[in-house]
Image: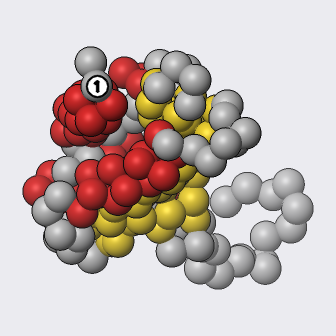
Amino acid sequence: MDDKAKIERLLQEQSDLLAEKGYTVTNLQSPNLDGQLMSELKEKLMKLYYPPAGETGIKSMQVGITGLFKSKRDVVDFKLNFLFDTAKKALQLTSVEAHHKERWKIQVFFHPKNCPTPKEMYDLVRPKARKPKPRIISEDSTLKKGQSI
């Protein structure tokens, strides 16, 4: 298999995985252009696929996509982190970051099939509903300590 075919196969594998997990423009109601994520991944992969002499080994790269949740009110930026082995010509998704306002989380996994979905990542970074503390409306100062009504 020639290099061009290998690159296309690597990209197709990642595209299939990301679509299966829900990291698509349609699923995320993303403002990103359709195909932008894979174009960015291809551009970065091409730079690593043909490394300068002496720069071999395992290299990392990151691509991003934005997702909209809660009727498009919550904006979450996802960063997908990949490792590329220049010797084996192997590409693997290794972690996902989710950034929402000041909150962020990262999920690292050993097998790409264990990659969390965007909804699972959103649930980690979205603000949790707070239960209000019970309020004391007034204290009855006429009762003495230990006295009952």
Asked if residue 75 lies left or right of residue 133, the reply is left
**Residue 112 image offset from top left, x and y in percent:** 42, 25
Location of the C terminus by quadrant is bottom right
In the image, residue 77 lies at what x, y percent?
41, 65
Q: Where is residue 10 in the image (x, y as percent from the top left)?
A: 31, 30
Q: Outermost residue toward the front?
A: 53
Q: Mark yes or no: residue 123 visible.
A: no
**Toward the viewer: 104 or 141?**
104
Q: Is residue 99 above or below residue 44?
A: below
**Rendered location of residue 57, percent (x, y):** 67, 31
- The amino acid type found where label 1 is placed reads Asp
Residue positioned 33% across, 31% down in the render: 3
Q: Does 25 sit left or right of 87 as displayed? A: left
Question: Is the image coloured rainbow, by chain, by secondary structure, or in one colour?
Answer: secondary structure
Q: In this view, does 108 lie to the left or right of 147?
A: left
Where 1 sits versus 56, above or below?
Answer: above
- Quarter of the figure with residue 33: bottom left
Q: In this view, does 2 lie above or below 64?
A: above
Q: Which of 57 and 104 is in front in this view?
A: 57
Looking at the image, which is closer to me, 59 or 3? 3
Residue 121 left/right relative to 18: right
Q: How crowded is mark 1: few (under 14 residues within 10 Å), some or many (20 or more)?
A: few
How many labels were placed on the picture? Answer: 1
Q: What element carries label 1?
A: loop
Residue shown at the point (71%, 77%) measured from the top left: 140
- The residue to which callout 1 is attached is 2
Residue 42 visible (yes or no) = yes
Identify the residue at horizontal 50%, vertical 43% (top origin).
Answer: 50
Residue sitting at 85 percent across and 54 percent down? 146
41 above or below 91?
below
Q: Between 126 and 23, which is closer to the camera in this rendering? A: 23
